[in-house]
């Protein structure tokens, strides 16, 4: 009995969830937050998110009008390093910390992520995230709104004019004041909530602590707004 063989070009592979193509250059956790938790929040806050997450793999009919085509694993690495450099620039005003890393250290950073080795990855990445004890200039944050709205990325300092640490709620209030208002008596009155890594965090924690401990491997906080 002959076994049928499936032949395909890696560049033609893509995935969808309920008919929506999934962006390969987004972290998988971010995709889940957007397409499952954000959508569930819009339908019913009490609806439990489906696990395991069922997605469909395609081998042809690549939706070039909706997705960027990836030709190889090197494309993933290039995008990852680009995000790492952007996060470094926001934190320090330059990309010197990344660019000054040796080739071996940059390779270790990628290999740690690719091989799912936390120790290998964090051994290099902590040198970027912890910032040598100096205050971060801006927080690398991206905010994802429903209905395919443009991604919000505001350069916001982790401290106010009096060098007091800002909370995540205050950061969101600066970026989206209509959705995360703070009244005159300083009592929060958020219209919506946010999720990251599948959870809804407290908005009253230090934004800097949050950026150092809850960022994705690309060193960005990817916050998804849930209505």
Image (cartoon, rainbow, N blue to C red):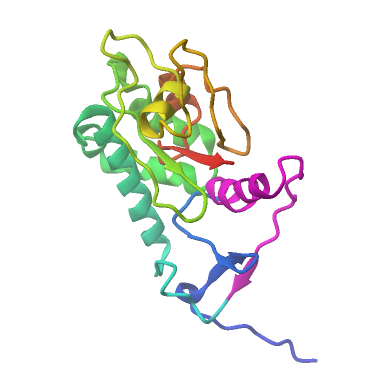
Quarter of the figure with the N terminus: bottom right
Q: Position of residue 184 (x, y in %)?
A: 43, 13
The residue segment tinted magenta is 29-58
Kindly identify the residue that appears in the image at 56 percent across and 78 percent down. Answer: 59
Q: Nearer the viewer, residue 31 or 175?
A: 175
45 is within the stretch colored magenta: yes
Residue found farthest to the front: 184
Instruction: Please name whichever residue, 4 or 56, is drawn nearer the observer in this view of the structure.
Output: 56
Residue at 32% across / 16% down in the picture? 159
Q: Please identify the quadrant where the C terminus is shown.
A: top right
**Which residue is drawn at the image coordinates 47% and 45% (left, top)?**
144
- Which residue occupies the foreground of this view, 153 or 77? 153
Relative placement, left or right, of 1 versus 120 is right
Q: Position of residue 53 (x, y in %)?
A: 70, 54
Position of 160 relative to 222 (above/below):
above
Magenta residue check for 134: no
Report whether 25 appears left or right of 57: left
- Count of numbered marks: 0
Q: Vertically, is 219 above or below 189?
A: below
Residue 131, image quadrant: top left
Which image quadrant is residue 3 in? bottom right
Residue at left 75%, top 51%?
Answer: 50
Residue 77 vertical placement versus 2 (above, below): above
User: Which residue occupies the extreme right position in the image?
Assistant: 1
Instruction: Point out residue 103 in the picture as x, y percentages from the top left corner.
Output: 27, 43
């Amino acid at each position: 009995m002959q076994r049928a063989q499936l032949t395909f070009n890696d560049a033609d592979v893509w995935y969808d969830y309920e008919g929506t193509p999934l962006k390969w250059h987004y972290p998988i956790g971010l995709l889940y937050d957007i397409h499952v938790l954000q959508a569930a929040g819009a339908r019913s806050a009490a609806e439990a998110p489906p696990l395991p997450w069922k997605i469909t793999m395609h081998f042809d009919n690549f939706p070039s009008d909706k997705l960027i085509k990836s030709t190889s694993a090197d494309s993933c690495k290039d995008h990852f390093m680009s995000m790492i450099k952007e996060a470094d620039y926001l934190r320090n005003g330059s990309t010197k910390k990344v660019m000054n890393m040796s080739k071996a250290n940059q390779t270790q950073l990628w290999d740690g992520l690719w091989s799912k080795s936390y120790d290998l990855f964090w051994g290099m990445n902590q040198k970027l995230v912890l910032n040598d004890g100096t205050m971060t200039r801006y927080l690398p944050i991206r905010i994802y709104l429903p209905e395919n709205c443009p991604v919000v990325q505001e350069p916001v300092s982790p401290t106010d004019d009096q060098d007091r640490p800002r909370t995540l709620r205050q950061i969101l209030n600066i970026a989206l004041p209509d959705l995360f208002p703070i009244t005159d008596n300083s009592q929060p009155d958020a219209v919506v909530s946010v999720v990251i890594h599948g959870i809804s965090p407290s908005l009253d924690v230090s934004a800097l602590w949050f950026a150092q401990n809850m960022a994705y491997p690309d060193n960005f906080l990817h916050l998804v707004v849930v209505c």
